[in-house]
Image (spheres, helix red, strand yellow):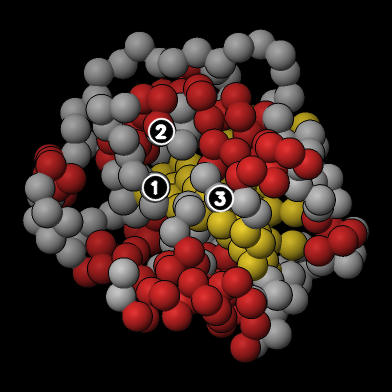
């Protein structure tokens, strides 16, 4: 492991806005702030919003800066990446941004039922061959239900035609209300400071000619099991090779945006 990464891990252990909890302690005694993030971590009563797979934390910090009346928590398993956003939030005194280093599969160990008001899923791996690892698949949506408030909102930003098409089909199959839907966010005419936050990788993808897709949908609180859509979706060709290989826009025919 390089010295720079080791230094970042050492910093993360000292950052007041970063939470890293050993799995053994989690199993033995549970997470002390579960159900009390707003009151005990942020010292307010504001809604809690999560960014899943936050990477460098650019979106978490950007959202927190724009919405001081909400609390934002970036979640990722890779601490060296998260260090960037955590450090920026500390240096700029952004008190409503925090970071949790854990696997997304464990989020119900850290958040209580109804504690989370909204989710952002920003540019996840589409997991084209592994449906149970897709962050918008039935496995994870069922997990999110355990922590989300009734009719909470889920936002997806992706450069993947595959994941966009799959998630649209998931919403249709399970009658999840679609609140926004576009296959070309920056060509759609949608105006929003939130949607205009652009991560480092998003800027790279836009420079390569890729369009950014965006879905916003509600996840009603119900006991009804979620169903996977019965649909064949063409794999993203550019993800079959190096990230530097550009998929031709002509290979993707987007559904009509709602």
Query: In the structure shown, which secondary structural element does the residue marked by tag 3 occupy?
Result: loop
Q: Are marks 1 and 2 in contact (CB under 8 Å)?
A: yes
Find disc 3 in the rendering and name its residue.
Answer: 102
Q: Measuring 38% from the left and 74% from the top, which residue is drawn there? A: 5
User: Which numbered tag is attached to residue 138?
Assistant: none
Q: Earlier in the sequence, mark 1 or mark 2?
A: 1
Residue 23, quarter of picture: top right
Image location (x, y in percent) of residue 198: 42, 68
Q: Earlier in the sequence, mark 1 or mark 3?
A: 3
Q: Nearer the viewer, residue 29 or 170?
A: 29
Find disc 2 in the rendering and name its residue.
Answer: 134
Viewer-nearest of discs 1 and 3 = 3
Classify 184 as above or below 44.
above
Image location (x, y in percent) of residue 10: 52, 76
Query: How many numbered discs sit on the rendered protein?
Result: 3
Query: In the structure shown, which secondary structural element does the residue marked by tag 2 occupy?
Result: loop
Disc 1 versus disc 2: distance between alpha carbons? 8 Å
Disc 1 versus disc 3: distance between alpha carbons? 16 Å
Q: Measuring 19% from the left and 32% from the top, which residue is drawn there? A: 235
Find disc 1 in the rendering and name its residue.
Answer: 124
Q: Measuring 12% from the left and 60% from the top, which residue is drawn there? A: 244
Query: In the structure shown, which secondary structural element does the residue marked by tag 1 occupy?
Result: loop
Disc 2 versus disc 3: distance between alpha carbons? 17 Å
Image location (x, y in percent) of residue 191: 52, 63
Callout 1 crowding tier (Cα within 10 Å): few <14, some 14–19, many ≥20: some
Q: Nearer the viewer, residue 184 or 43?
A: 43
């Amino acid at each position: 492991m390089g010295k720079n990464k080791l230094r970042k891990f050492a910093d993360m252990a000292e950052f007041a806005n970063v939470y890293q909890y050993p799995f053994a302690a989690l199993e033995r005694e549970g997470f002390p702030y579960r159900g009390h993030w707003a009151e005990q971590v942020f010292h307010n009563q504001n809604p809690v919003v999560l960014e899943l797979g936050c990477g460098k934390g650019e979106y978490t910090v950007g959202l927190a800066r724009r919405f001081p009346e909400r609390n934002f928590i970036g979640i990722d398993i890779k601490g060296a990446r998260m260090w960037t956003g955590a450090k920026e939030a500390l240096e700029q005194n952004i008190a409503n941004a925090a970071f949790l280093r854990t696997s997304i599969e464990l989020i119900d160990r850290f958040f209580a039922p109804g504690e989370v008001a909204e989710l952002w899923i920003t540019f996840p791996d589409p997991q084209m061959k592994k449906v149970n690892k897709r962050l918008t698949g039935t496995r994870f949506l069922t997990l999110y239900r355990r922590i989300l408030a009734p009719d909470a909102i889920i936002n997806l930003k992706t450069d993947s035609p595959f994941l966009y098409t799959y998630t649209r089909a998931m919403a249709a199959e399970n009658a999840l209300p679609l609140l926004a839907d576009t296959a070309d966010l920056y060509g759609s005419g949608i105006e929003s400071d939130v949607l205009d936050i652009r991560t480092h990788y998003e800027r790279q993808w836009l420079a390569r000619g890729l369009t950014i897709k965006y879905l916003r949908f509600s996840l009603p609180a119900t006991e009804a099991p979620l169903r996977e859509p019965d649909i064949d979706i063409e794999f993203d060709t550019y993800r079959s090779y190096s990230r530097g290989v550009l998929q031709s826009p002509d290979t993707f025919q987007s559904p009509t945006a709602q």
